[in-house]
Amino acid sequence: GKFAEGEVNVECQFCNDDKVLRGSTTAGTGTDSALGCICPKGEYENHMSGSCEKVREGVKVDVEGMKVTTLDLKKGFWRTTVDSFEVLPCQGEHHCAGGSNLEEVCEEGYTGPLCAVCS
């Protein structure tokens, strides 16, 4: 994928660049800024390394454009905060709903670390 920054810039730049986001592309045929550069399905944006990296076990592989803060977890997995790289299996698969909203990661009736506490 490529982008052209600004209204008068006619020179396209590649998203997959050390100055933008290594390993990235665009959702469509192009974008109007570097902010439109996203990681492909099965990868997420690691803001610390400035590159797209393969998702870890417990993260869905069919979602494009994920960042550390928007990792979409599979059912049965949990993590402490939206900034955490660590994804852990729940005490019981049926305890954790998955998804990217950590406020709703535990199934009804469960709460706390690893959704292991009855609520």
Image: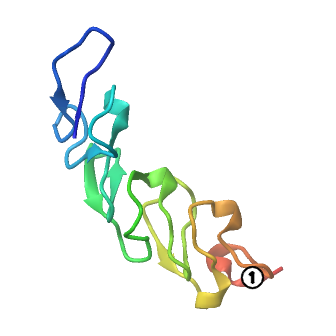
Quadrant where the N terminus lies?
Answer: top left
Q: Return the x and y of residue 96 as percentages of the image width and height.
A: 63, 79
Query: Looking at this rendering, what residue extends furthest in the front direction?
Result: 29
Q: Tag 1's secondary structure?
A: strand
Point 75% across, 82% down: residue = 117
Point 27% across, 40% down: residue = 29
Number of marks drawn: 1
Quadrant where the C terminus lies?
Answer: bottom right
Is residue 66 found left or right of 1 in the rendered image?
Answer: right
Query: Looking at this rendering, what residue extends furthest in the right direction?
Result: 119
Point 18% across, 41% down: residue = 16
Q: Return the x and y of residue 88 as percentages of the image width and height.
A: 49, 77
Is residue 17 found left or right of 56 in the rendered image?
Answer: left
Identify the image quadrant of residue 80: bottom right
Is residue 113 found left or right of 64 in the rendered image?
Answer: right
Is residue 39 found left or right of 70 in the rendered image?
Answer: left
Identify the image quadrant of residue 11: top left
**Residue in front for this viewpoint, 103 or 4:** 4
**Residue in front for this viewpoint, 104 or 7:** 7
Point 39% across, 51% down: residue = 65
Q: Return the x and y of residue 43 as percentages of the image width and height.
A: 31, 60
Residue corresponding to mark 1: 117
Rendered view: 107 above or below 13 = below
Q: Residue type at mark 1: give it.
A: Val
Instruction: Classify 10 Å Cα crowding around label 1: few (below 14), some (14-19), many (20 and above).
Output: few
Colour style of the rendered protein structure:
rainbow
Q: Return the x and y of residue 8 as percentages of the image width and height.
A: 27, 8
Rendered view: 41 above or below 92 = above
